[in-house]
Image: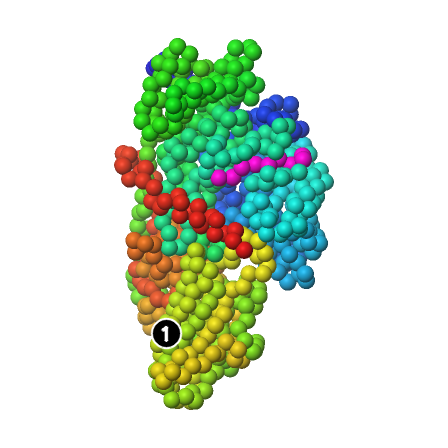
Amino acid sequence: MEWWWRLYWGLVVIIMMEGCGHAEGGEVTYDGRSLIIDGKRQMLFSGSIHYPRSTPEMWPSLIAKAKEGGLDVIQTYVFWNLHEPQPGQYDFSGRYDLVRFIKEIQAQGLYACLRIGPFIESEWNYGGFPFWLHDVPDIVYRSNNEPFKFYMKNFTKKIVNLMKSEDLYASQGGPIILSQIENEYQNVEAAFHEKGPPYVRWAAKMAVGLKTGVPWIMCKQTDAPDPVINTCNGMRCGETFGGPNSPNKPSLWTENWTSFYQVYGQKPYIRSAEDIAFHAALFIARNGSYVNYYMYHGGTNFGRTSSAYIITAYYDQAPLDEYGLKRQPKWGHLKDLHAAIKLCSTTLLQGVRTNYSLGQQQEAIVFQEETGGCAAFLTNYDRQNITVQFQNISLKLLPKSISILPDCKNIAFNSAKVNTKYNDRIITLAQTFDSTDSWEEFKDEIVNFEDTSLKSNGLLEHTNTTKDKSDYLWYTLRLEHNFSSTEAVLHVQSLAHVAHAFLNNIYIGSANGSFTTKNFTMDIPFMVKDGINNISILSVMVGLQDSGAFLERRRTGLTTVTIQGDNNEFYNLTNYEWGYKVGLLGEELQIYREENVGDVVWSENGISTNQTLTWYKIFFDAPKGDDPVALNLSSMGKGEAWVNGQSIGRYWISFHDYQGNPSQILYHVPRSFLKTGENLLVLLEENGGNPLQISLNTVSIINVKKDSSDDQIVSSFEDYIDMENYRYTY
């Protein structure tokens, strides 16, 4: 069939060239088959790219690569906590410039899907809610609750009006063809009992009432009220989606997971290009007309934006990796899939669908137009090659695959046959930081009881005290030694993520939880001195939970503190008077900013390693060229890193997976964060590490031969399903 492949690729080129034009706005409606834009049915492929997880300088390249990959739509959440950090105070600057992002999509001739939420989950801190909501009297999030509905409507209206003011809805000639309200609410709806269904109806009515001129969707919401469209999220929506809740609504897939989010202590989940393509093709074959890849580019959780235990690199296994580089064969294989579908999209959207068996585990799904157009999907669920007869043609079907025949005669694409070359990421050393003379350090203060102004009889809840302004909260106690034991054990129970304990300003131990545990304990032997003993426990959060019912009720921080002496003496310190301080001194003074580094005294006589609560700083030159830049922090422990005052995220090298390896060692430094020379790098190290062994690297890709390990599933999908279910417990 060499002639067919020449024809096929010729058509691919024509289609891609035609796709270079402007995606014209117009009236957007729908019926039971597809979205209808300006009177034309549309078969749409979409990809999630989140504007704050990259930089404005990266947006044009990311969108261009998505378009080159055959996408029609860019989908993004809207991040409430970024845009309204305080009630009525809005920020749409820099990485938060939503209008600029949407206009870049428009400039490149693509459509946009705007998932306003405003609850988004997305492995984003607090599910996208600003923490000030927590302090609104009588509020119950995501419920038929008047205070919550007031603020939710206010923000949703703010975003809709902003888009309208810039003429960005398709009804105004702009690129936005879909908007989403709420997000996977059905996962928690039952927890709200009689307050759940009315909230769904209210949210839908509120959104539709904003008159965007384009349809609204609700994902994972089978009771989505008309005219809102219910959509599917998951890895296998061609098999699991029960379909629209009305025959007049199309089948839309808002999240086809290209990988899965990764947490500290876990390996990445590697989903093959073949599996993604198989399930996307199956969804289209079963009357789907919109497939969105979540994520198409994951990007970076800069600063403190990731939710509990989520690593800084987000969906790095997506078709475009964290740095925006093409991950092959995933990117190219999906591009081929899109081209094959577009060859017969008119037939798929207008033809009559029939299906029939080709064998015990083989099926043909055929679309036939009255005008003669014909397209077919031949599915082989078996794990071995099968030869079938289809329309008097003998065809070989590869194991667990779907073959697409745009003319019902020739196979233009098979989901299990990868024609794209594989590539790999190359990390090139640009600079080491092994000169002791180049580093300076500042040791943060250990807070004692007398240093605190906030006192309470009992253990305060962590996040209600910090208001999420910092990951850190000091719990301090002044204890007089009035018992006979000199050896004792400090026992701490916590609902936070990490705890570091100090006795009389001396570090005595740490402990931490994990993504799948809701609490942890710390038991530390120590020697009691005569007189006054200062106990200081630094409680640490690594992001707030992003999902589940009643987020406003979640308790974090220390819950129990006791001392057990060696003479069976026992002291329950839980209800003693404690002193509290939010954050660290270096945080408060923002010494990671160049204009503030002089506000503390940095040691210039060499640096110490493996120290707790130590700040390190160094100046460096940017690597030459345009390749992405990453810091290798494999010699560090846990903390946060800043470059020129901008946080590149939390790091937690000391949290190892089951094979004893860190979950992440490379941390993205966007080129736009850098100057040519004299770049300031500041590290906050909590519990040890050696900055003399970190390095600055550039990242590139190179074609490689396929290796058997390329198809290996590094972690079982069942583990991730368990993690997903864990999120919604309440």
| Residue at the image position 61 percent from the left and 26 percent from the top | 32
| Residue at the image position 48 percent from the left and 78 percent from the top | 573
- Residue 344 position (above or below residue 590): above
- Residue 58 in the magenta stretch? The answer is no
| Residue at the image position 44 percent from the left and 39 percent from the top | 258
Does any portion of residue 161 appear in the rendered image? no
- Residue 229 in the magenta stretch? The answer is yes
Name the colour scheme: rainbow
Q: Which residue is mark 1?
A: 524
Give the side of residue 133 with respect to residue 444, left or right. Answer: right
Q: Nearer the viewer, residue 288 or 666?
A: 288
Residue 354 drawn at (x, y percent) = 51, 19
Residue 189 drawn at (x, y percent) = 60, 48
Q: Which quadrant of the rendered structure holds the N terminus?
A: top left
- Residue 15 position (above or below residue 619): above
Q: Which residues are magenta?
A: 226-234
